[in-house]
């Protein structure tokens, strides 16, 4: 069965510092991979997605992620974090053989930003 | 285009009651999915509807049901509420085109069961 692991429950970084959030997935074929962000009391906003092609994908708000098949990873990065990036981040994979609407999510990583 | 809307935004019910949540997808989107989000279990897929038909279902008891109308609006119903049903229920829509489409999420309905 497909699964997504986000090893870090909570990360704190200083404003201006770089950020990397880890995501590992378990999937039999080429996965559809996503990163979402959720601010308190809000729904999910898509940061970026990987369907195929270039393994380095650019997203909104200055985020990027790299798909590494050999490591089954899809880590999210940002070179310089802003205070407004404080939120919870979710990695997700499109379920195998399922419909488009079935995403499997990791448990999330909460990001805190120190001034 | 207006985004995905969910009503109500907040709801308080007592154990044993039933509840209906509503989701209006983005105009033109034919697929609607529902997710439950809790601190313990995280985000879990409930079901997906496409053109008024349930296309996929997650691992939830039969107390959780849904439907989709001809205008793509969707409702989910939870009967005989339990304390553990307290959660944020998120609805997402996508165009339902061939290939893989981006999911657009609504703000959610916060259900509290007392």
Image (cartoon, coloured by chain):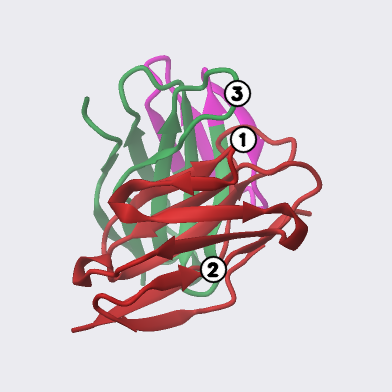
Residue A71 in the image: state x and y as whole percent: 73, 62
Horizontally, residue A103 falls left or right of residue B37, namely right
Q: What residue is shown with label 3?
A: B99
- The secondary element bearing badge 2 is classed as loop
User: Label 2 crowding class (10 Å Cα cut-off): few <14, some 14-19, many 20+?
Assistant: many
Horizontally, residue B23 falls left or right of residue A57, namely left
Residue B48: name its quadrant.
top right
Give the vertical position of B89 relative to A108 (above or below): above
- Which residue is pictured at 38% across the width and 67% down the height? A88
Give the vertical position of B41 relative to B20 (above or below): below
What chain is the green one?
A: B
Residue B114 in the image: state x and y as whole percent: 36, 72
Q: What residue is shown with label 1?
A: A53
Give whichever of B48, A29 is nearer the camera. A29
Q: Is residue B55 within the magenta segment?
A: yes
Q: Quadrant of the N terminus of chain A?
A: bottom right
Q: What residue is shown with label 2?
A: A107
User: Label 1 crowding class (10 Å Cα cut-off): few <14, some 14-19, many 20+?
Assistant: few
Give the vertical position of B48 relative to A35 (above or below): above
Q: Are marks 2 and 3 in contact (CB under 8 Å)?
A: no
Q: Which residues are magenta?
A: B49-76
Spatial distance from mark 3 to mark 1, Cα to Cα?
15 Å
Q: To which chain does the residue with label 2 belong?
A: A
Numbered disc in front, either 1 or 2: 1
Horizontally, residue A71 falls left or right of residue A12, namely right
- Which residue is pictured at 26% across the width and 43% down the height? B7
Q: To which chain does the residue with label 1 belong?
A: A
Q: Are marks 1 and 2 in contact (CB under 8 Å)?
A: no
Which shade is chain A?
red
Q: Which mark is residue A7?
A: none
Q: Is residue A12 within the magenta segment?
A: no
């Amino acid at each position: 069965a497909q699964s997504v692991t986000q090893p870090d429950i909570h990360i704190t970084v200083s404003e201006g510092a770089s950020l990397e959030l880890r995501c590992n997935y378990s999937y039999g074929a080429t996965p559809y991979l996503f990163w979402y962000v959720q601010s308190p009391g809000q729904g999910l906003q898509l940061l970026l997605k990987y369907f195929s092609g270039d393994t380095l994908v650019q997203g909104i708000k200055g985020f990027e992620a790299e798909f590494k098949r050999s490591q089954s990873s899809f880590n999210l990065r940002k070179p310089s974090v802003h205070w407004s990036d404080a939120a919870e981040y979710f990695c997700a994979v499109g379920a195998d053989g399922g419909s488009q609407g079935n995403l499997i999510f990791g448990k999330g990583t909460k990001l805190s930003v120190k001034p | 285009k207006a985004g995905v809307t969910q009503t109500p935004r907040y709801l308080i019910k007592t154990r044993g009651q039933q509840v209906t949540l509503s989701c209006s997808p983005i105009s033109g989107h034919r697929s609607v999915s529902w997710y439950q989000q809790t601190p313990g279990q995280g985000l879990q897929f409930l079901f997906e509807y496409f053109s008024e038909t349930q296309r996929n279902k997650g691992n939830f008891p039969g107390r959780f049901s849904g439907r989709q109308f001809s205008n793509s609006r969707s409702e989910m119903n939870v009967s005989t509420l339990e304390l553990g049903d307290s959660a944020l229920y998120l609805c997402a829509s996508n165009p339902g085109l061939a290939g893989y489409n981006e999911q657009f999420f609504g703000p959610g309905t916060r259900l509290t069961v007392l």
